[in-house]
Amino acid sequence: MDGAGLSEPERVILAEIERELRTDEALDRRLRTMRPTAPVGGAFGSFRGFRQATLASLLSAVAVMLFVMAAVSSTPALLWAFAGVWVITAVCLLQLACRWGARRLATRHGVPAETSAHES
C-alpha cells in the first residue's frame, strides 16, 4: 500500500472496534497479564518427553512381538513377559498423556509451559 494509510471511514470503524474491545474486561485482563513465553520444543516438549515417547514406542513393538509369539506357542512365560511389558508401556503412555494434557491446559490458561509441575 503506497497510499496515506486509512481513510476517514476506516478510521471511524477502527476507533469503534477499539472502543468495543476496551469494554471487554476478560480480554483486557488477559492482554495485560500476557507474557511472552518460549515456544515448547516440538511435539514432545522436551528431550525427556522425546526419550519417553521413544521408549513407549519400542516397548509397544516388543509387546506386540511377545503377544504374537505367545499366541503362536501358548507358552506361559511369554504370556507373563507380554503382560509385564504391556503394563510398563501403558504407564509410559499414561505419563506422556498426562504431560501433554498439563501442557495443553497450561497454555490454554496463559501459564508458561515451563512452570508446569510435570516438566520436572
Image (tube, grey):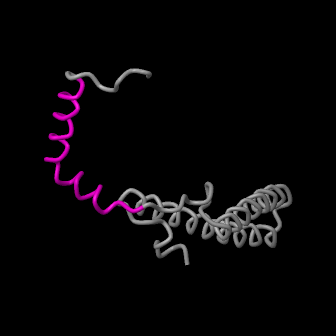
In the rendered image, the vertical position of residue 80 relative to residue 25, given as above or below: below
Camera-side residue of 85 and 80: 85
**Part of the protein shown in magenta:** 10-35
Residue at position x 68%, y 62% from top? 53
Q: Dividing the image into 4 quarters, which one contains the C terminus?
A: bottom right
Residue at position x 71%, y 73% from top? 84
Q: Residue furthest front?
A: 4
Q: Dividing the image into 4 quarters, which one contains the N terminus?
A: top left
In the rendered image, the vertical position of residue 13 relative to residue 54, given as above or below: above
Q: Residue furthest bottom?
A: 120
60 vs 95, left or right, is: right
Q: Main secondary structure of the magenta part?
A: helix
Quadrant of the rendered image containing residue 44: bottom right
In reply to whether residue 16 is colored magenta, the answer given is: yes
- Provide residue 106's location: percent of width, then percent of height: 41, 63
Camera-side residue of 61 and 46: 46
Quadrant of the rendered image containing residue 69: bottom right
Residue at position x 46%, y 72% from top? 116
36 vs 97, left or right, is: left
- Provide residue 32's location: percent of width, then percent of height: 28, 60
Residue at position x 39%, y 62% from top? 35
Camera-side residue of 103 and 5: 5
- Provide residue 74's location: percent of width, then percent of height: 81, 62
- Provide residue 7's location: percent of width, then percent of height: 26, 22
